[in-house]
Image (tube, helix red, strand yellow):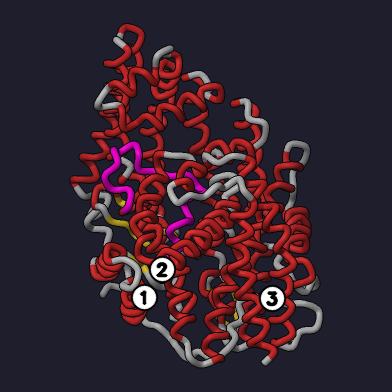
Amino acid sequence: MNDVWDLNPIYTGFDDPSYEADLQALKQVVAEYTAFAAELPHMEPLEGLRRGTELQEKLSALSTLAIYANLRSATDAKDPTPGSYMGQVMAIRSGIAAPAATYNQWVVSLPNLMELVRKDEKLRDYEYLFQTKLSFAKHQLSSEAEAVNAKLSMSGGSAWAKLQGYLTSTVPVTYRGTVTNLSSIRNLAYDPDPQVRKDAYEAELACYEAIKEPVAHALNAIKLETISDCQLRGYESPLMRTLKHSEIQKETLDAMLSAMDEYSPKFWQYLKAKAKALGHENGLPWYDLFAPMGKTSSVFTAEDARDYLVKQFSTFDSQLTDMVKRAFDEAWIDFYPRDGKRGGAFCSGIRKLNQSRILTNFDGMFTDVVTLAHELGHAFHNECLEGHRPLNMGYSMPVAETASTFNECVVMNAAIRSATDKEEQLALIESQLQDATQIICDIYSRFRFEAMVFENRSSKFMNADTLCEYMLRAQKESYGDGLDHSCLHPYMWICKSHYYGPTFYNFPYAFGGLFARGLYARYEQEGAAFVPKYKELLHTTSVASAEDTAKVAGIDLTDKNFWRGALQTIADQIDRFCQLVES
């Protein structure tokens, strides 16, 4: 079994003849699209809709060019080659902006658009897609403005995001007389030795001094670009633009956040109980947030992780189990941290292969096994979309975390049920509560921080110290008295790449985590009969709003009681945790 992922099935390299052929094909599609847009005024509506759909499907098939460059860059930020090729692809694709805007404007101008779509066999599958185009019509710029916007983004927000990624991937971290990287030092937050955790935390904070100002410039530039884009397109705010693109209602977000507010004291109770058990009197210091508790001597190799996950998923669904086996056996996964490799974890779908590629920074802890389960959930979500037409393969941010967190529930609940020793049970429950606290308290702090940044960016530039002040304020509000306020993490805005990508890419994690827990509770009630319903729900995510997707399982997302129910499952675990640490 390989330690690194195999990208050869995509392309054997940038010199692969297939890569060059696809690059030329992309240029050809751009040229065809441009010519098509010029002919639109003289086309019959049905012919124009069919032709535009075909061109967009061709473009979708060539997305592998950008995906490959991103995957290459993710494992070696020091290599300039992937960035160079990504720039080339983006430059070519920017030529689509103007003709695509012309096409979209033409589409939404058709008075009988949905009638044409519903009556035509080739277009009927894209009914939701065309409805979405209609809803975004008032936010679209002119074709000329869209073209300019696309070109400027290459040297604007996209470039600033790459700077953040480069700086955090390459910044040297001095730890106990040696130099390491940020991914490795952050992994030490899970170390069983309290002094190691504290020293690693201090080393991490110290390393940010060297990069904090350039990253602050990156964040300011990205957020101002977002504000300007929202103003140009007529969005009320960046948050409302995100909700629109996320395909969820403000009522849904409000119901979820309101329920999270209600249950926040329960999470503070957990943090204070953990702090007391670890010998802290004034709440938990940041460096002990991920301190392991209980006793588990399990250290996993990649092979161990495969066997464990296959065993746990086999009790749930054979399709998921078979996919997990393939992921390990066919080298979909890049496991271990190394210099130049980006931190964290992600999953990228490769549609032309019906496969995914998964990056982790695996360190052998049980939490790393859970991270693998999480990313394999994304891969399973991608697989459940098979059968859709090419333009129906994407899904919105909030539902993106559903399958991944559901996978975590399957693995963690099975592990807790099988634990016979109280110390082992404590270790497992505490690990799950760590993750739950991240999607509630930490995500809420990220949401609050980003809201503060947008509130202030229009009128002023925020230097690193100001951003640290905002982050500390957000953490205090979200973690309450559960954390020691003298030992927080003011630099979380530097190391979290989410701030440098899609706007407000934080609440979707809370949404996905709670939505998945609510679904898992249904699974526990219904058993095997729920599994086909669950897979149908995942299949529906790309062709329906979040609210309509939830209806597949009989759930109303605007009802706070649903979110309360999901949070109560965590509250019950907190009660059990408190009993275990007291005993």
Name the foreground residue: 127 vs 555.
555
Residue 116: which quarter of the image?
A: top left
Q: Check disc 1: other Cα within 10 Å, few if <14, some if 14-19, many if 20+.
A: some
Q: Amino acid at mark 1?
A: Gln
Horizontally, residue 170 falls left or right of residue 32, namely right
Q: Which mark is residue 251?
A: none
Q: Which residue is mark 3?
A: 270
What type is the residue that disc 3 sits on? Tyr
- The CA span between labels 1 and 2 is 10 Å
Bin the neighbour count of mark 2 within 10 Å (Cα to Cα): few under 14, some 14-19, many 20 and up.
Answer: many
Q: Is residue 387 magenta?
A: yes
Q: Is residue 546 above or below residue 432?
A: above
1 or 2: mark nearer the eye: 1
Mark 1 to mark 3 CA distance (whole Å): 27 Å
In the rendered structure, which disc, 2 or 3, sits on the residue that comes first in sequence?
Answer: 3
Mark 1 or mark 3, earlier in chain: 3
From the viewer's side, name the closer residue of 160 and 360: 360
Residue picked out by circle 1: 312
**Would you place residue 288 above or below residue 546 in this image?**
below
Segment colored magenta? 384-407
Q: Residue at x 52, y 29 (%)?
A: 149
* Residue at the image point whose x is 52% and y is 32% from the top: 152
Query: Where in the figure is residue 382, as x and y percent of width and height?
Result: 34, 52
Q: Is residue 484 above or below residue 26?
A: below
Q: CA distance from mark 2 to mark 3?
A: 25 Å
Quick one: SS at disc 3?
helix
**Where's residue 437, x and y in %?**
63, 68
- Residue 45 in percent (x, y) is at 32, 13
Q: Is residue 545 visible?
A: yes
Quadrant where the C terminus is found in the figure: bottom right
Q: Which residue, given by chain and number where applicable, does mark 2 sit on? A: 373
